[in-house]
Amino acid sequence: MAKAGAGGSAKGGGGGGSGAGHSSAGGLGKLKRKPVQVRAGAGAGAEGSVDGQSAHAAAAFGNGTVGKHASGGREPSGISSFREACEYLFARTDLERLKPNAATRDLYRLDRMHELAKRLGDPQNALRMVHIAGTKGKGSTCEMVATCLEACGYTVGCYTSPHILDVRERMRINRALVSENAFVELTKRVASAAQEMEAEHGPATFFELTTAMALLYFAEEAVDAAVIEVGLGGLLDCTNIITPEVAAVTMIGFDHMDILGKTLEEIAAQKAGIYKPGVPALTFEQDKKVLEVLRGKATAVGAPFSVVGQDIDFTARTEFVTGVGPLVRASLVTERNNYDHVTVPLKGEHQANNCGLALAILDKLSERGFNCPADLVSKGLDQTRLPGRFELVTRSPRVLADVAHNPESVQALMRTMSAHLPYDSLVVVFGCAADKDIPGMLRQLAAAADKVIFTKASGNARATSPGELARKYHEVSGGKMFQIARDLGDAMELGLRAVGRDDVLCVTGSFYIVGEAKKWLAAKLAAKKK
């Protein structure tokens, strides 16, 4: 039974009508849906499917590989199936897949998103939300906050991006993907609103449409809380039309520099754009210049600012447990809560800070009427699963998938493998987007991998060519072994032939590489069973 948190509606399982604080905004109609059924992990295990994909839609729409003009000008009123909804959405401008020089700042604007939300009844105004930005770790932090709130008895919406296998992974309630039927109806309604305003405001992008769909979905399901991940940056990201209960920024690093700026300070200023007047603003210990910018931006807008590990008492340590291996334990203590010696659920020492930030978010929510007791928070952490983050996809041979896509994340991945997945030889299948710090990532690979196979995700204009990756790798690795594969399937075949029982094949570099690899492995496994 979900509790009413400071004006939130008390109800069970994500269904039911809206209560105090969650009334439907602007006459929003109620979507008909079955009660939420919790499935195994975010974005995984949907019924009747492989790895969460609908059988009839998996091949084309699992990771958004439809071309820019695939819809052929389909009218919103003509959308009648999940396939057609996907065709419509993936035909829109997708900033996640544009070539770096095409993703200019003028594509990032809030006036169109404000107008789109207004035409839908401003559903964001009916929601109590947590807003999370950052260069790395924001997806992990979102997942920990959402599962902990769910364990505390709340009905929780979670909006994250990109997806790995199924576009519906982006909008979930209590870890259950939005149903296909609801997804179709949401697409039709949001697309119709976008079409009405296109002449004045220009065509809505893929991310604007899906963000509006998620906000509408969560409002109509009257969730008690919604955890919203920023897509890119913060200040001009289309999620920034919301006013959350808490705003948090994870680790800041170099990413999307053509849009966000060339220095850490410039990037931090964009991320801090999610801080709002009177709304608790959080981050954790990191580069001093970054903290100065974040603190300055929070002060400028009147947001009470706290740094986990400085202003909020937080400690973490690693201990070795026989039969389990290294575990990271974290403690966060405030006047309201004593989250003592909880187990960090996601592998890797770097996840300690993300967990600490999640605990601080829960503590700030406690200030604002939510009830987040330590025993239930610990239970929620134990239930946290996140596909594509140190995910052992197959055990024989051992194939590991991780969406690491910047130097710090790749370095953390290599360290985590050494601690949790000992191997004789490490073979890496790698592909990444062109706007990343490629030399930085390749240096981390060169320090750990015995062999790297370079490839690229299909249908992604942002992907760097395998040949260019190989050329740069040769420059930074001192001549270490590599191969080039024309596509992901060839790369996986090469990788599987190169590893034995005591080796590891690691697929990394982007969400899209990991998504394709998981689909390829699922298809190969299914073919073997026939």
Image: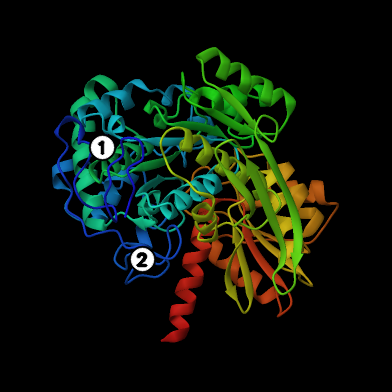
Give residue 136's position: percent from left, percent from top.
60, 41
Q: Is residue 381 left or right of residue 71?
A: right
- Numbered disc 2: secondary structure: loop
Q: Amino acid at mark 1?
A: His
- Numbered disc 1: secondary structure: loop
Residue 1 higher or lower than 211, as above or below: below
- Residue found at x 40% / y 67%: 45
Q: Is residue 230 visible to us here? A: no
Give residue 290's position: percent from left, percent from top.
68, 26
Crowding near the residue tagged with mark 1, few <14, some 14–19, many ≥20 C-alpha atoms within 10 Å: many
- Residue found at x 46% / y 20%: 278
Name the residue beneath numbered marker 2: 46
- The foreground one among 170 and 254 is 170
Give residue 229's position: percent from left, percent from top.
46, 39
- The foreground one among 502 and 45 is 45
Which of pointers 2 and 1 lies earlier in the amino acid sequence?
A: 1
- Residue found at x 37% / y 42%: 225
Tell me the tag on residue 89. none
Quadrant holding the C terminus:
bottom left
- Residue found at x 66% / y 43%: 353
* Extreme residue toward the top, this view: 300
Quadrant holding the N terminus:
bottom left
Give residue 268's position: percent from left, percent from top.
61, 26
Q: Is residue 200 left or right of residue 263?
A: left
State how far apart marks 2 and 1 are (Cα).
Answer: 28 Å
Residue 499 higher or lower than 376, as above or below: below
Name the residue beneath numbered marker 1: 22
Q: Is residue 429 left or right of residue 188?
A: right
